[in-house]
Structure formats: structure tokens, C-alpha cells
Image (cartoon, coloured by chain):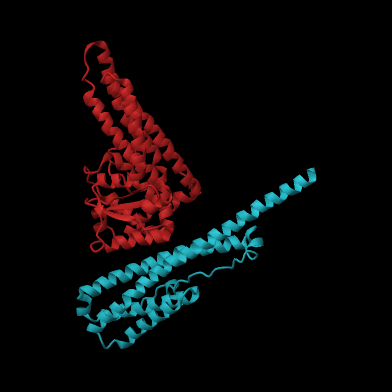
Chain colours: A red, B cyan
Amino acid sequence: MVYEDIAANKNNTFILLFFYGILIAGLGWIIGILYGDPYTGIVIGVTASFVMTFFSYYNSDKVAILSSGAVEADRKIYPGLYYAAEGMALAAGLPAPKVYVMPSESINAFAAGRDPKHSAIAVTTGALIKLNKTELEGVIAHEMSHVKNYDILVSTVAAVMAGAVFMISDVIKRSAFRRNSGRAGLIFAILAIAAAILAPIGAMAIKFAVSRQREYMADASAVLLTRYPQGLIGALEKIKKETYPEEEYNSGMQHMYFANPFALRADNLFSTHPPLELRIERLKGNLYKENPKI
Amino acid sequence: MALTAIVLGIVFVIAVFVIGIFNKLVSLKNRNSEAWAQIDVQLKQRADLIPNLVETVKGYAAHEKETLEKVIQARAALTGAGADVAKTAAADNMLTGALKSLFAVSENYPQLKADAHFTQLMTDLSGTESKIAYARQFFNETVRVYNEYQQAFPGVIFAGMFGHTQKQFFEAPEEDKKPVSVKF
């Protein structure tokens, strides 16, 4: 079953990259129209989409780590984090990931990379302070499961692509009113605004489709790694008690985190993570036994 | 003519089938030895920490000779166990026990406990110990899968033929399995 998940994740990544390629080429075309040269726009758009596709495949982990503000963890300062990460890698039979620390008071973590050999796990300083050893291992085991299932490939590529689309549509929004001579200019401007609004929505929709259910899977696999559900349950319960909103998170990355920092604002349809209560309940074993696929 | 084709076809299908089983057995065996190598690395790392630990403890608690001697013996047994799973497991369990009593003894020496070097060694030792536990868990999982494939059909027909044998589990220490008893 895990192998099917891995294959599905690789397929989804391909589809995602393809879709984003078209989206970016289309955006290039619209920018071209705005500047009066649609063909140059298309050429630039297609070139950019190729470059971005390859770039985001090979460098996605670095980009994700950079935009989260995480820095490589010092082994001397965080020995426990390294031991937890290496222990979980051993339990999963995978190479040890690179370990990063994010300065933040909240409890959170994410994994990035294109495959288990190029994986990275970032943990907030808040998590390192507030969680005990078994809880931290539970969180890292959850992230390690994402690594093992190649969830990180899809989610990291999606994050980088979404970030790029946000950036480009921002450029369109700003340049939309440049050519405002006559009716044609007005129509183009409207089109451009529509595209600029639609692009991020499309980007978000894919991202959300990518995550959600896999969180339950990763929770379940994490318990298989630690053989100690109480650790993960303890961590989730500590997060539940935290109420302050997290403004420092990058919204293009929320699907990657261990727990969704925007949970309070997001509604059910667009939320990237299942509610904490359901995750805890399922870990406690009531729901999971009845219907493991939900 | 048709008969030859059918026979050839059947032979071909069987050959593909057998090759599949052969490869599966090989990859399971390799995964098992990789898992073993991982345990070995962790055990070596722990063994490397011990001389340092013994020296540090000697500085503060020289007359705890018996406890220190046990740790040294267990370490020697572990390094001498080689690739024998049962021997290594026994030596590893012995070392874990010896270290436990050493740490219990260290409770009586506040100066030792306050030593920065000793604290660092404690962190490293408990970290490696949990890494060994996880490596052991994964190793046992590979043993289970490998053994099961050899026992079940169709692996059971070919496993012996291709020279595959049942692997031994890395047994957890006896005391881990016992229920915890609290004495007052």
C-alpha cells in the first residue's frame, strides 16, 4: 500500500508540474498582451516554466527551508533533536535527514525535499522547548513518514510553484493598468486582474487537494515507527492548548507543517489539515480501526 | 510445432516467476544486512564513548571498581561479538545493564553529576541507546519479512534451494519485557 502511495505521489508531482507549467506559460502570454507583444510573452513564459519546473524539482527543499526562516541546527546545542531525527530515520530504514531549527514560539515542524536521500526536517524552537523526548520523537516520526511516502516531493514542489505563481500574479496586478488607452486596454486589464486573482486560487486548490488525508496516514505510520502513540498524542494535545495566531508563517507553505498554523481562520473545505481533535481521537484508536482509509 | 511453442511458453513463464522469487529473496536479504550494518554503526559509536566515560567516572569515583569493571567487560564482549546476532544482542544487553548500574552509582557523586563532560557523555549515551533501539526495531522488521517470505508459499519452495536461511531476531533485553516492579 505504501508503494502505491509513493507511485501516486510521484504521479501527482508530475501532473502538478505540468499544470503549473501551463499556468505560468499562460501568465507569460497575458503579460505579453499587456505589453503589446503576446508571442514574446509566450516564449518567455514557456522558458520560465521549464526553468522553474527543473529548479523547483532540484532545489525545492532549499527554497522551502529558506522561506521558512529555518537555519541548520547546531549539533552541540540541540543534541536531542539530532538523536530523535536519526533514531526515527533508523526506525524507518531511511538515511538521516538534514535537521533545521525555526525560531518560533509555537510548536510546529515540517519536512521538505525531493526524496528520502535529499530530505530535511525543520522544527520550531518552541517545539524543542515545550515537547518532551517522546513527544518530539512523535512529531519527527510524523515528518519522517511524509519523507518515506514521498509526500514531501509533492508538497515541496507545490509550495515552490505556488510561491512563484503568487509572485508572477503580483507582477500582473501591478502592470495591469499600464496600457489603459481605449476599450481594448480596459478589457485586457480586466482579464489580467481576473487571471491574477484566479491563479493563486488555482494554486491553492491543488495544494489543498495534495495534503489533508495524508496527515492521518502520517500519524498512523508515525506510531508504527515510535511504537508509542502517547508521544504523538501528547504533542498534538500541547498544540491544541496553544491559542495565539501565527503571523510569521508563510501562507504558501501551510500545507507542509505538522499542524496548520492558520487553523483558526481556515474553513473546513480549504483547510490543509484535519482538526487536531480528530487526529487525536484517531490515534487513540477509536476511529482508525473502523475505517482506516478516511 | 504448436506443442513445442506451448511448452516453451510454459517454461518461459515459470522461468520469469522463479527469477522474480530469486530477486525478491536477494533484496530482502540485502535489506536485512543493511539494517544490521546500521545497528553495528550505532553499537560502535556507543562502544567508542565508553573509555571516555570510564575515565571521567574514575576521576570522581575511583573506588566503584566493580561497576566500572563490568562496563569494560561488557564493552569488550560487544566488540568481540562480531557479526553474530545472538552474541551481539546478549553483549549489548549486558552493556545496557552495566551502564544502568553505573548511572545509578553516579547519583551518589554530586560532583560527578555536575561535571560538564559527564553530562555530555550521558546525553550522547542515552541518545545512542535510543538509536540502537530504533535500529534494532527496523532490523527485526526486516528479519520478520525475510523469514516470512521464506516460510510462505511460493518462497518456501525456492528459499532453501537458493541458499537462504532463517535469520535471528535481535532480542530485546529480558528486563524490558518484565513488568516494572517498584520497591520501597
Q: Quadrant of the N terminus of chain B?
A: top right
Task: State the image coordinates of residue A5 (x, y, percent, origin top left).
Answer: 47, 46
Residue A100 appears in the picture as rendered: yes
Q: Quadrant of residue B103?
A: bottom left
Question: Quadrant of residue A167 in the image?
Answer: top left
> Closest to the observer: B165 or A293?
B165
- The vertical placement of B115 against B140, above or below, is below
Q: Name the spot of residue B152 as percent of width and height, x first.
A: 62, 60
Q: Position of residue A111 (x, y in %)?
A: 34, 50
Of the pair A152 and A279, the residue shown nearer to us: A152
Nearest the viewer among B54 and B141 is B54
Residue drawn at point x = 42 percent, y = 60 percent: A91
Image check: A178 left or right of A10? left
Q: In which quadrant of the rendered image does the C terminus of chain B lie?
A: bottom left
Determine the image quadrant of residue A190.
top left
Reply above or below: A29 against B11: above
Say which residue appears at 24% left-offset and 59% top-offset. Answer: A74
Classify B44 as above or below B12: below
Residue drawn at x 32%, y 36% as measured from the top left: A162
**Is B167 on the left or on the right of A271, as rendered?**
right
Q: Visible in this render: residue A272?
A: no
In front of the other: B83 or A44: A44
Q: Residue furthest top?
A: A182
